[in-house]
Amino acid sequence: MRGSHPALQAVRLALNSSVKEPGKRMKFRVVIQQDEDGVFVAEVPSLPGCISQGATRRAALDNIAEAIAGYLESLKQHGEPIPPPIDEAMVDVAV
């Protein structure tokens, strides 16, 4: 999942239009998992409750872009700050 994916570009565009500050860019980590029914569920860990889904991975990314934009707009309307990104690391464990 690199920055060239159209759905990720949509996330960036949505973020830029929600933040309403020219040139300001933000990146949010999106976790995507396929549930037992085959639906792709997308969640933004740094934005509690910001979850969406789609029948395909791309649809889930497109939907979470809209959810992020709405979440950020709500924060702005209520005078709340945008939460900082969550730091993450991969851990290698013997199994």
Image: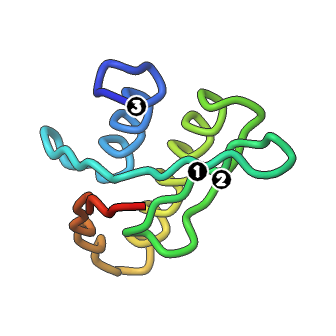
Task: Return the residue nearer the eye: 26 or 86.
Answer: 86
* Spot occupied by residue 92 in the image (x, y as percentages of width and height): 27, 58
Q: Residue pushed farthest front? A: 95
State the residue position of label 3. 8
Judge left or right: residue 59 versus residue 26: right
Quarter of the image for the C terminus: give it: bottom left
Q: Quadrant of residue 77?
A: bottom left
Mark closest to the chain's N terminus, 1 or 2: 1
Look at mark 2 in the image and give the residue it sits on.
Answer: 52
Rendered residue at 70%/29% (across/down)? 56
Q: Earlier in the sequence, mark 2 or mark 3?
A: 3
Seen from the viewer's position, the closer of residues 39 and 68 is 39
Q: Amino acid under label 3?
A: Leu
The residue that disc 1 covers is 42
* Mark 1 vs mark 2: in front: 1
**As rendered, which of 89 and 78 lies closer to the eye?**
89
Q: CA distance from mark 3 to mark 1?
A: 12 Å
Question: Residue 39: x percent and y percent?
Answer: 78, 43
Vertical relation: 74 (above or below) 52: below
Q: Mark 3: which secondary structure? A: helix
Q: Residue at x 20, y 48 (%)?
A: 21
Q: Amino acid at mark 2?
A: Ser
* Amino acid identity at mark 1: Ala
Residue at horizontal 33 percent and vertical 53 percent from the top: 28
Residue 75 falls left or right of residue 65: left
Label 1 packing within 10 angstroms: few (<14), some (14-19), many (20+): many
Mark 3–mark 1 contact, CB under 8 Å? Answer: no
Q: Nearer the viewer, residue 21 or 57?
A: 57
Q: Residue furthest left?
A: 23
- Give the crowd class for mark 2: few <14, some 14-19, many >=20 residues within 10 Å: many
**Residue that appears at 57% across and 72% down:** 49
